[in-house]
Image: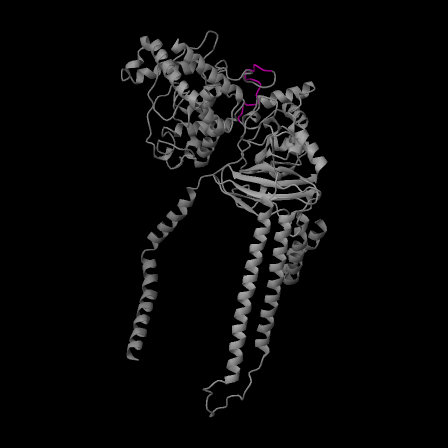
Amino acid sequence: MQTANRRCAATLKVTNALCVVTPMLIERHIFSCLIMLSCMTAMSCKREERKFRVPPPADELSENLPANNRVRPGPLTSGTPSTSQPVSLERLTHEPFAYQFPQNAQSLSDGQFLFESFNCSGCHAHGGGGMAPPLMDRKWLYGSNPDQVYTTIIEGRPNGMPSYRGRIPDFQVWELVAYVRSLSGQANRSAASGREDHMATEPPPNSIPKQSPVPQTEPATKPAKGEVVNPSLRNESRTQPASAPATQPTSSAEDVPGIGRALAADCAEDALGAGRALPADCATRRAMPALHEISSVALAMQRCEKVHS
Amino acid sequence: MISAVKPIRPLPSAVGRGMGAAYRILLAAALLLAIPGCARELNSTESALDPAGPQGQHITSLWWLFFWICVVVYVLVIVMLCGAFLHKRKGQAMTPGSDPITKPDEEHEQRMWRVVFGAIVVTVITLFFLLFSDFATGRAIHGLSQSPDPIRIQITGHQWWWEVRYGDWPKRFGERLPYNMITTANEIHIPVDSSHPIAVDLQLESHDVIHSFWVPSLHGKRDIVPGHPTDLWIRADRPGTYWGECGEYCGYQHAQMRLVVVAEPVEQFQAWLTAQRQTAPDPSNKIQERGQTVFMHSACVMCHAIGGTEARALVGPDLTHVASRKLLAAGAVPNAPGHLAGWIVDPQRIKPGARMPQNNLNPLDLRALLEYLETLK
């Protein structure tokens, strides 16, 4: 009986103490409580937005763009690298998507989906490189800035990269740009994907350290006669070696043909490897604009023949 | 539908005046009445209680068995409960000063024991009966998968649409050759033949996340887990159009991931099959030509395929016979030129989050593209 009473009293005491202490604590630490609360509220501001409807780019419909086709601007024969229509660099550098998308997980993963869907992997092999240069290392043949990658996708590049002008909506190109750059750590690590959808030997994009690109001297193959290259881009690629002098033994101008040969040999080897792996790759593909594929395969074959003869 | 909704209108003011209860009941009744109305589009059904084939029939029978047994149990329990409330205790009331009852009535105890024991036995028997009938239904449903010479259809769930490929079929529907295979989307045609019933083997797989294939009139749900292909055998015994949908939450547009199963007599099915095996016709006039050029030089060609042209991408639905389908965007809108135009220009208004991007085509191009797509019967 006594023990029961004691227990009862003890419980009462504890309850009383709690009732007294808790308001006191809250009162005394009212500010810290408020700060904690506001911190918790502020965390919800970090939620990223997902916009489904994007405003159309201003000049997609404009008549100013040079057209080589009576319906839409764009190369009629797909697969031929087109540098004849310079994109306006001014617009590209002021493009808000270029800054928003690397911060946005949804855009990055949409970019990844598009990368697989549009069969970029057919040549770039999940960023590891195959017939085309790898995208997860520090070497950028045509520049690593968002506007440069954008230009690469839109205009195409010599030796196989087709032009996708008019075929990929503007915001999707920017999503691709953001994803491609995230492969070498150029995106916000808290937004980049923590998991690749395919087997990967590299760590996922969110744990890749940011790599500073190694500038290249000139495109390995000089543009053919008659092709107009955006002058500002040309200038940029020329000024880049000055910022990183002599670190690259291959960056002197005399070696350019040598680089070209080495690159061709590399490509041919890769193409041979890719040629063997092609059937399996074809089986798993999701999208294959057929002509692009044919043209790149043909190019690769050509190179192989050249190297082996 | 409209007539069912009408009585709801005076609701807000009525609630304000405190007449809420009656109106709430009315509202509930009206909504209940309106539910079956939802499935009445396209003169079709979507009800597990309106079976159209043996599988659905088995499931419906089981459902009614469960229903009536549960009704009986429910009524019994309620009657017992009411009895217990109303029943007066027997025996003399306790008066102050009398001795408390320490020894219960022997006979009463015996009876209680028998009742409780009997109830337990009946419950166990009922549950075993339900278990057995469930098992028997499962066996009966499985029986269809033994049928010889089925039509095999590969169905792939995407976010948020169904890819449908006819992979194999009985000899009488044509040679089993690759060029006879057809690909379509969100619409499955199956034959109905009372003399030689034809079973259909749906080979289900998922491309991205977990989906669930569900056509209530024909079969129960079947979850599709990525990387785990599964089979579902169905058969339709009467012609009709049966709605189906995704039965497992699969993302933002899960609700707009629907499909129709069109069960039709063999001749019609054969005609449909023959039509679907054709490649797309060439454009026959200038406008259609321009439409085709627009298709091949804009974003369309990156994701869609049109048989007989250079468009061969497999990301979005195959458009070789898009004009022959009843629905667009996996059942989000009916297939009509206006809806198609709206869908091409701004899919994100109709189905926010869908993979299809907005297409800023100029009006003439859009018009030509529509003309061309309308020829893809």
Callout count? 0
Visible residue check, residue A169: yes
- Residue A191 horizontal/vertical position (percent): 40, 36
What secondary structure predominates along the stretch shown in magenta?
loop
- Residue B113 horizontal/vertical position (percent): 51, 77
The image quadrant that residue B336 belongs to is: top right
Residue at the top extreme of this rendering: A225
Q: Is residue B34 left or right of residue B351?
A: right
User: In the picture shown, does residue B300 fall above or below B197?
Assistant: above
If the image is split into quadrants, where does the N terminus of chain A sit?
Answer: bottom left
Assess whether residue A60 is covered by the magenta stretch: yes
User: In the picture shown, does residue A212 fall above or below A302?
Assistant: below
Q: Is residue B130 left or right of residue A184?
A: right
The image quadrant that residue B44 belongs to is: top right
User: In the picture shown, does residue A227 fall above or below A152?
Assistant: above
- Residue B369 horizontal/vertical position (percent): 64, 25
Residue located at (60% from left, 47% from top):
B219
Assess whether residue A84 is covered by the magenta stretch: no
User: In the picture shown, does residue A272 fall above or below B50?
Assistant: above
The scheme the figure's colours follow is one colour
Depth order, front residue of B219/B186: B219
If the image is split into quadrants, where does the C terminus of chain A sit?
Answer: top left
Visible residue check, residue A236: no
| Part of the protein shown in magenta | A57-69
- Residue A193 horizontal/vertical position (percent): 40, 36
Depth order, front residue of B108/B159: B108
Depth order, front residue of A90/A237: A237
